[in-house]
Image: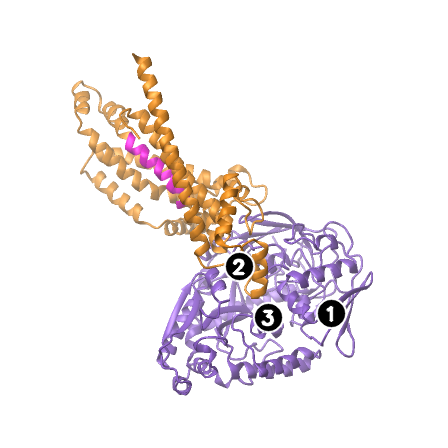
């Protein structure tokens, strides 16, 4: 509990600083940020990797972003869109006088060209393209997006920072891969030496939105002269670096290193809760394609033991069947009755008998040690599943192999993954018919269509209850619990709000 | 008389060199083929890695097509070999630059790490090995032998982490990782190499120590050493000028091989210390399935091995004219 109290205190201090309570902001200084590796690209449209979003969100901006409560809020847009009564036409006013890093001024033509590129090459853009029929520059400072059917996830998709709908000069939108990293963000790319550093420097032509700091929205102050992202792929080295105080911010540390970090030169920062580990089920082929077997898996698993094995202490996880934790508008406990913290072996056995499972085919769990907590959860799950009568085969491969094999429905029954809590449920892979797991059903489409068509946020929150119920009824995936993330921060670095995709505008050094 | 001997020796050298070069070409052709096949049959896909965890199968297929990975493996092989023969190792998928440029960018830390490690290993191993042999069976010999065994059995990542904990975290003498930021001077960059070089050097010294000791033991009992002693020569001159000089041939061989081993041994050490060298480049290329980069880097490492072996073989000819290939 003492860890949690300290973490909470740390988070509160950071939050209060970020919200303008601190008044000692001084301009200048360089911040070194240790990341988990080198991003595969600096084109945020081209990848859904979190690391790409973390770095490039300082260089590029989107029309909208997320506020502190994960609602969408304007960034390059001047205001929230005007939506036609039928929900098909979004009229988006743009901020004027916004400069790109090459000193050209952003116009609606740049926005249209950028969004067209996004729909062509970005995974999330292609998702939006299925309902977007037209994007037009109404005038120099207005863009109109026309949809074929009401689609509420449009704004969160436009706001998300990976596979992101960044706005770049129209002249650069034909580049694929992107070669000119010219955005409108508060920091611009100075130099990239792969696997050594990515150096971002303050963009003097930046125009902050102004107002109060509000999550990723609101004012973006450029106190720092430079931000340098340095890849430190080895987690033990990141721990050592955090203890030595070599970097101002060290991202993604193993939670078990909390005490070591506390004793070192930097302070631990806990983001609680950070995300969910998920057991994705293969609904298309194999043992888990039988819904009764999936329900048996759901009954057999004991999330409390799995989370304890994975994260070591209750300070770093919560056992929670709701897909979203209480701090999110999407939180609901409805439908989670089948989530049993200690498992329900007898129910699992009965469901397996009903399904006629005889153990002749193993339940294949595809996992990796890239994230050690995946593997630890798999080991505990194996024990509980075997106790329920499953014959379990653990297929432990390295991450690149897993990302390939999970696309082949013949190779697995369960694969283990995780994600930060996504601000919009429609962004979850499980919602797509084509993502690995291939969950397709009439019940899914009915609740999801209603959820996506509704534009009123309050009504959408109510509709998500039905979505969660269907997920529990059909078990396309099993959310194990909520886990926290650990980072480390130089005590002299202020103004950093704990976030799943940490950002350093508004950050400043006090020494 | 001497002119005829020189002429014979030269023709033997040329014939031997040509034989060895032909062998090198065969080895390199095998390396090109084996690396290409292993890389392609290993599961994993650069397109999936680049596009991230939420990419759809259609997105991955589309990127594979753009990268030319949808062609058949024989077609890709012919294209690759054609490029290699023209000196074109292809384009790194993730770094978006020619493989040769990527390797050149990473050569500096690996080159100096190898040099420093080798220097540390040699400076430790030669005196310790010579003295161990000279004082055979003594406490010093037994201690040196035990320490050499210990050093040989330590995993480099473990020793690296221990050094990091003591000298970087506790004492603060060095950075834990990296190779200096923008504008880092040569001295600053070299400072980052101290801990990794000591790590690799200590471990490599074990093998050279053992070889030095064994080689010295062989020659210390030879007749010419006894003759030198009977002529009243000082022990220092006997050991260093006569015994060590003759024992150096196998020692040089193992030092040369250690140098080649260090290039690949740096893979783990560079990863632990976050050094942007060829070793860490290979690791990241493998994890990302950057096929052209894996192939290019392994080809260069294999080429270095072959080249070092060639040089050693040629040195044998110079040192011992009786050797033939």
Does the segment drawn in magenta span residue B280? Answer: no
Query: Do pointers 1 and 3 mark residues of a single chain?
Result: yes
**Residue count near mark 1 (Cα–Cα under 10 Å), binned few <14, some 14–19, many ≥20:** few
Q: Is residue A63 above or below residue A383?
A: above
Q: Which residue is mark 3?
A: A422
Q: Which residues are magenta?
A: B249-265
Q: Nearer the viewer, residue A104 or A396?
A: A396
Foreground disc of the pair 1, 3: 1
From the top left corner, tell me how far across and down residue A255 is, in percent. 47, 65
Nearest the camera: A137 or A466?
A137
Q: Quadrant of residue A110?
A: bottom right
Q: Which residue is mark 2?
A: B49
Q: Residue at x 39, y 82 (%)?
A: A357
Q: Which mark is residue A345?
A: none
Q: Which of the two residues, A101 or B294, is positioned nearer the viewer here?
A: B294
Q: How many marks?
A: 3
Dots 2 and 3 on the same chain: no
Tag 2–tag 1 contact (CB < 8 Å)? no
Secondary structure beneath disc 3?
A: loop
Q: Is residue A146 left or right of residue A31?
A: right
Distance from label 2 to label 3 (Cα)? 20 Å
Q: Which residue is mark 1?
A: A133
Looking at the rendered structure, the secondary structure element under dot 2 is helix
Q: Colour of chain A?
A: purple
Residue B212: which quarter of the image? top left
Please name the color used to draw chain B.
orange
């Amino acid at each position: 509990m003492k860890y949690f109290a300290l973490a909470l205190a740390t988070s509160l201090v950071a939050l209060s600083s970020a919200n303008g309570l601190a008044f000692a902001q001084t301009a200048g200084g360089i911040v070194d940020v240790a990341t988990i590796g080198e991003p595969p690209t600096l084109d945020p449209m081209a990848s859904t990797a979190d690391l790409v979003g973390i770095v490039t969100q300082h260089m590029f901006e989107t029309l909208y972003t997320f506020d502190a409560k994960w609602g969408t809020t304007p960034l390059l847009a001047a205001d929230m869109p005007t939506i036609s009564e039928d929900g098909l036409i979004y009229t988006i006013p743009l901020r004027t006088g916004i400069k790109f890093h090459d000193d050209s001024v952003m116009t609606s033509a740049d926005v249209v060209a950028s969004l067209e590129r996004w729909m062509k090459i970005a995974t999330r853009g292609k998702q939006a393209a299925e309902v977007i029929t037209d994007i037009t520059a109404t005038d120099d400072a207005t863009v109109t997006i026309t949809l074929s059917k009401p689609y509420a996830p449009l704004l969160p998709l436009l706001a998300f920072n990976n596979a992101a709908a960044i706005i770049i000069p129209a002249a650069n939108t034909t580049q694929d891969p992107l070669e000119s990293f010219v955005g409108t963000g508060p920091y611009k790319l100075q130099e990239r030496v792969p696997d050594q550093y990515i150096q971002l420097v303050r963009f003097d032509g930046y125009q902050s939105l102004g107002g109060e700091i509000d999550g990723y929205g609101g004012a973006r102050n450029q106190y720092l002269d430079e931000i340098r992202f340095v890849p430190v792929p080895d987690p033990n080295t990141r721990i050592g670096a955090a203890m030595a105080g070599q970097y101002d911010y060290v991202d993604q540390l193993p939670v078990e290193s909390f005490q070591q970090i506390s004793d070192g030169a930097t302070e631990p920062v806990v983001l609680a809760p950070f995300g969910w580990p998920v057991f994705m089920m293969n609904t298309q082929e194999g043992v888990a394609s039988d819904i009764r077997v999936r329900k048996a898996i759901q009954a057999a698993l004991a999330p409390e033991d799995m989370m304890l094995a994975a994260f070591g202490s209750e300070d770093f996880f919560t056992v929670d069947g709701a897909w979203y934790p209480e701090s999110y508008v999407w939180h609901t406990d409805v439908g989670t009755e089948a989530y049993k913290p200690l498992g329900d072996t007898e129910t699992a056995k009965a469901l397996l008998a009903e399904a006629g499972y005889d153990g002749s085919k193993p339940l294949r769990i595809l996992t990796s040690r890239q994230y050690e907590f995946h593997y630890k959860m798999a080991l505990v799950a194996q024990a509980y599943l075997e106790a329920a009568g499953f014959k379990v085969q653990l297929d432990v491969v390295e991450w690149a192999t897993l990302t390939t094999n999970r696309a082949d429905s013949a190779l697995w029954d369960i694969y283990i993954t995780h994600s930060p809590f996504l601000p919009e449920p429609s962004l979850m892979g499980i919602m797509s018919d084509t993502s690995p797991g291939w969950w397709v059903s009439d019940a899914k489409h009915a609740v999801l269509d209603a959820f996506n068509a509704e534009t009123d946020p309050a009504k959408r929150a109510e509709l998500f209850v039905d979505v969660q119920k269907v997920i529990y009824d059909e078990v396309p995936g099993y959310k194990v619990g909520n886990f926290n993330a650990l980072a480390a921060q130089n005590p002299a670095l202020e103004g950093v709000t704990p976030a799943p995709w940490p950002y350093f505008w508004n950050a400043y050094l006090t020494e | 008389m001497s002119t005829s001997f020189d002429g014979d020796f030269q023709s033997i050298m040329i014939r031997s060199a040509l034989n060895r070069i032909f062998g090198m070409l065969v080895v390199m052709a095998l390396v090109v083929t084996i690396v290409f096949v292993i890389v392609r049959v290993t599961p994993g896909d650069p397109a999936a890695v680049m596009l991230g965890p939420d990419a759809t199968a259609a997105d991955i297929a589309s990127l594979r097509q753009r990268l030319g990975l949808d062609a058949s493996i024989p077609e890709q092989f012919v294209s690759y070999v054609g490029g290699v023969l023209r000196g074109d190792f292809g384009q790194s998928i993730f770094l978006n630059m020619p493989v040769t440029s990527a390797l050149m960018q990473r050569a500096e830390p690996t080159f100096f790490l190898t040099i420093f490690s080798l220097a540390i290993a040699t400076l430790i191993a030669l005196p310790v090995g010579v003295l161990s042999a000279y004082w055979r069976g003594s406490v010093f010999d037994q201690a040196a032998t035990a320490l050499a065994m210990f050093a040989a059995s330590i995993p480099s990542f473990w020793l690296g982490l221990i050094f990091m904990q003591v000298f970087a975290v506790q004492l603060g003498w060095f950075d834990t990782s990296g190779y200096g930021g923008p504008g880092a001077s040569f001295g600053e960059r070299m400072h980052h190499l101290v801990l990794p070089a000591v790590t690799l050097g200590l471990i490599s010294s074990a093998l050279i120590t053992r070889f030095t000791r064994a080689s010295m033991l062989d020659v210390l009992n030879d007749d010419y050493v006894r003759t030198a002693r009977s002529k009243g020569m000082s022990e220092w001159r006997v050991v260093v000028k006569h015994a060590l000089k003759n024992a150096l041939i196998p020692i040089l061989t193992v030092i040369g091989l250690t140098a080649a081993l260090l290039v690949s041994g740096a893979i783990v050490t560079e990863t632990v210390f976050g050094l942007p060298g060829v070793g860490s480049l290979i690791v990241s290329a493998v994890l990302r399935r950057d096929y052209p980069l894996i192939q290019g880097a392994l080809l260069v490492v294999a080429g270095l091995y072959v080249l070092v072996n060639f040089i050693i073989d040629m040195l044998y000819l110079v040192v011992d004219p009786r050797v033939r290939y």
